[in-house]
Image (cartoon, rainbow, N blue to C red):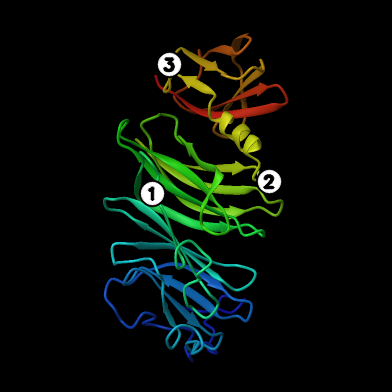
Amino acid sequence: MARLTSEGQTDASFNGNGVRCNLYGGNSGNSIGGIAVRSDGAALGAGSVSGGKVAAVLANGQFDSGFGTSGLATSPAGTNAWRTSGIGIRSDGRILVTTWKPTSPFSIQLAQLMPDGSPDPSFGTDGLALFTPQGMNISTWMSNAVIYPDGRIIISWGRFNSVASELDHAVSWFNADGSPHAIGTVITDLGPNSSDQDNARGLAMAPGGDIIALGSFVESSGGTAVLRFNGDLNTSSIAEEINAFALRVFPNPANEMLRVEWPGEARIERVVVRDASGRVVPSNARITLSAACIELAGMASGPYFVEVVVGDRMLRRLFVVER
């Protein structure tokens, strides 16, 4: 763990040299899955060692003797097979640690500690909530968690669909006590093709409460995607966000013609094609209620975006022209 000044220089007041090593006792294979800062300036580092440990280091670089055992607390996450992905501090000082198991049986665990590092008995079972998605496998990545002011929890992770042999991006909602929220899990296919290998890379909450998720997809060249979900935790509003990804765009890659289909009741009002820089590309689109056919003549090979206005919303999807 290292501490820098606001100018980006090593902070000599932190352990004398700006660095605190061997957070978890020098065990081999250590890795930090996340870091959070308490209101008193102490840093909490969650590591993937012995099932998950949290180290508390004061602003001066010394371990917090009042936390766990000599500044080190063991998360109730289980065995070494679990990997730590994130850590968050609630407004009352309790600590949320997210872990995941990349081997069968695949699972996600949410662990919660009291401010002194002991397990929180009010969370899950003895401080541990286990989440095993039905019919899904956990992929190789899970991001951090976001904690709402009212205590509810959101996580993002990569879901492997063994039937389709593909990876999808997933976002799951939980209640403050670790139990699944009514919204459940939102599955999104990020890339231009259904066979893309999608994964979760980050999660944050916007000032207005909306959830921003960062994902990546790997195909021939790969790419990144940013998703935004309404933050009021209203199931219907979340469903509207999901519908944005229900817009069908095919074939993809396309050559001469691109077809767009909207499954909802509202009709398609307008269709616009833009290149990768955002400039409008002249195109001829034939619209019939909930579908549109776009002629791609004259468009060079490469990535494009199609913007579809449905009712009072604009939906945007990526597609590729391949000559």
Question: Is residue 87 toward the left or the right of residue 212 in the image?
Answer: left
The location of residue 290, given as percent across then percent down, is 60, 13
Q: Earlier in the sequence, mark 2 or mark 1?
A: 1
Which residue is tagged 3? 255
Residue at 55% over, 59% down: 177
The location of residue 165, given as percent across then percent down, is 30, 34
Identify the element where label 3 is drawn: loop
Q: Earlier in the sequence, mark 2 or mark 3?
A: 2
Distance from disc 2 to disc 1, alpha carbons, whole Å, reads: 25 Å
In depth, the one of 49 and 236 nearer the eye is 236
Vertical placement of residue 150 versus 139, above or below: below
Q: Nearer the viewer, mark 2 or mark 3?
A: 2
Q: Does the image show residue 21?
A: yes
Residue at 48% over, 61% down: 124
Vertical placement of residue 234 versus 129, above or below: above
Which residue is tagged 1? 132
Residue contact between numbered discs 3 and 1, judged by CB atoms under 8 Å: no
Which residue is tagged 2? 232
Distance from disc 3 to disc 1, alpha carbons, whole Å, reads: 42 Å
Identify the element where label 1 is drawn: loop
Residue at 60% over, 74% down: 93
- Crowding around mark 2 (Cα neighbors within 10 Å: few <14, some 14 to 19, many 20+) is few
- Crowding around mark 3 (Cα neighbors within 10 Å: few <14, some 14 to 19, many 20+) is some
Which amino acid does the dot numbered 1 rest on?
Thr
Determine which quarter of the picture holds residue 274: top right
